[in-house]
Amino acid sequence: MFHQRSFGSLGTHFVRTQLRAIHIGFRRMANIATTYSDPVRIAVIGGTGVQSLPGFTHVATLDIETPWGSPSAPVSVLHHPSSSTGKPLPIAFLSRHGQHHEYAPHEVPSRANIAALRSIGVRTIIAFSAVGSLQEAIKPRDFVIPNQVIDRTKGIRPFTFFEGGMVAHVGFADPFDEGIAKIVRKCGHSLEGEGVRLHDTGTIICMEGPQFSTRAESSMYRSWGGSVINMSALPEAKLAREAEIAYQMICMSTDYDCWHDSGDVTVEMVMGHMKANAENARRFVGAVLDELSKDEHADLVLAKHLEGSMKFAGGITGVIGRKPEAKKNIGWLLPGYFE
Ligand SMILES: CSC[C@H]1O[C@H](OP(=O)(O)O)[C@H](O)[C@@H]1O
Ligand SMILES: Nc1ncnc2[nH]cnc12
């Protein structure tokens, strides 16, 4: 048993190393750059079933190391052919659960993900999530643009950049970005009738997982007014707020969790709906990027409304009390804020 286990882990390491080598080899063969000199302002985080964004021109793959470790995958820089400006719009794409869905929800390195995106200039994130529906009216394959979240994670995920000698308390009354949400809703409605059904608002219950909910929990969440349930909105949205990034989730319903008589949620169910509706998700994100690339949204995309907010939220620790390691890390995330 012992031998089997140690051989197994060596084997896994070997296979991973080989896969990485093959992957880097492909990147070289495909002539994909490993650096990108212009700032990238918009990122898409892909969730379950969205490990890549087909239909965009892949121009660079960035391996970024942060004080909080490596992100869940290399960050891809894609060019979106903007219909409004004519210039290609660079966007970053990051697969939340890794390139092959190897990170469970509680293992996703969210701090590294958000810090890595911020470090290349990202100020707006559109995050995808596969969710269970807690309301009859939200049918499988419907999209929901959430405006609230209830935290049912268990405190086992690192959830702040500010600790170890730098304290911050940032406002989180509205966990998503209403300015970005308005644009996302408008784009979603423009696709209605072409297979997209959209719910303009909703409350996400973000549970710990990785196991799905019990029937009692599912009923309780419904009685709380929850619209949908996932395992990924937090701490991602909180960390984005601390990084002064405008963050909006787009949820796609894949099941009725376990409260409904149509059958309990399974991974097959989630993946089946994600796969069947992938083209709608792609068209949806394309429409959102088209709209965000317009000059009139430049300040919104740059999250000017959040700029500088952490100087005050994070200025609570007296200069003498700031620990060098924490200061160094925060300096990496928000250069020049706390000198
Ligand atoms: C595979 S079902 C549970 C899984 O799906 C959702 O992932 P994501 O939000 O990344 O699309 C949910 O949050 C769970 O992680
Ligand atoms: N029922 C569910 N519970 C939690 N996360 C989910 N993601 C998709 N369906 C889900």
Image (cartoon, rainbow, N blue to C red):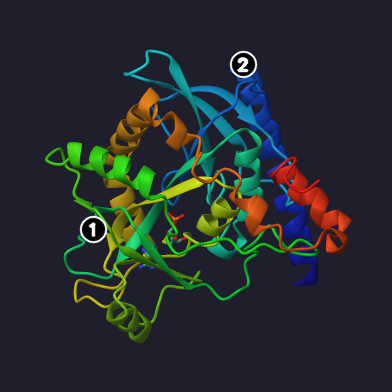
Above or below for 44 versus 67:
above
The quadrant of the picture occupied by the N terminus is: bottom right
Q: Position of residue 47 (x, y in %)?
A: 45, 50
Q: Which residue is tagged 1?
A: 140
Please tell me which residue is depicted at 27% across the width and 70% down the height of the picture.
134
Among all residues in the image, which is located at the extreme bottom? 216
Can I make out residue 137 in this image? Answer: yes
Q: Give whichever of discs 1 and 2 has the lower sequence position.
A: 2
Q: Which residue is tagged 2?
A: 31
> Looking at the rendered structure, which numbered label has been put on residue 278?
none
Please tell me which residue is depicted at 59% across the width and 36% down the height of the picture.
75
Tell me which amino acid carries mark 2. Asn
Mark 2, other Cα within 10 Å: few <14 / some 14–19 / many ≥20: few
Q: Position of residue 103 (x, y in %)?
A: 58, 56
Q: Position of residue 40 (x, y in %)?
A: 55, 29
* Left or right for 183, reference 209: left
Q: Is mark 1 within 8 Å of ligand 2?
A: no
Above or below for 21 versus 181:
above
What separation in Å lies between label 1 and label 2 (alpha carbons)? 40 Å
The residue lying toward the viewer, choosing from 114 and 330, is 330
Badge 1 marks a residue whose secondary structure is: loop
Above or below for 107 versus 81:
below
Please tell me which residue is depicted at 61% across the width and 16% down the height of the picture.
31
Can I make out residue 102 in this image? Answer: no
Tell me which amino acid carries mark 1. Pro
Please tell me how many numbered marks the rendered image carries.
Answer: 2
Classify the position of ligand 2 by quadrant: top left, top right, bottom left or bottom right. Answer: bottom left
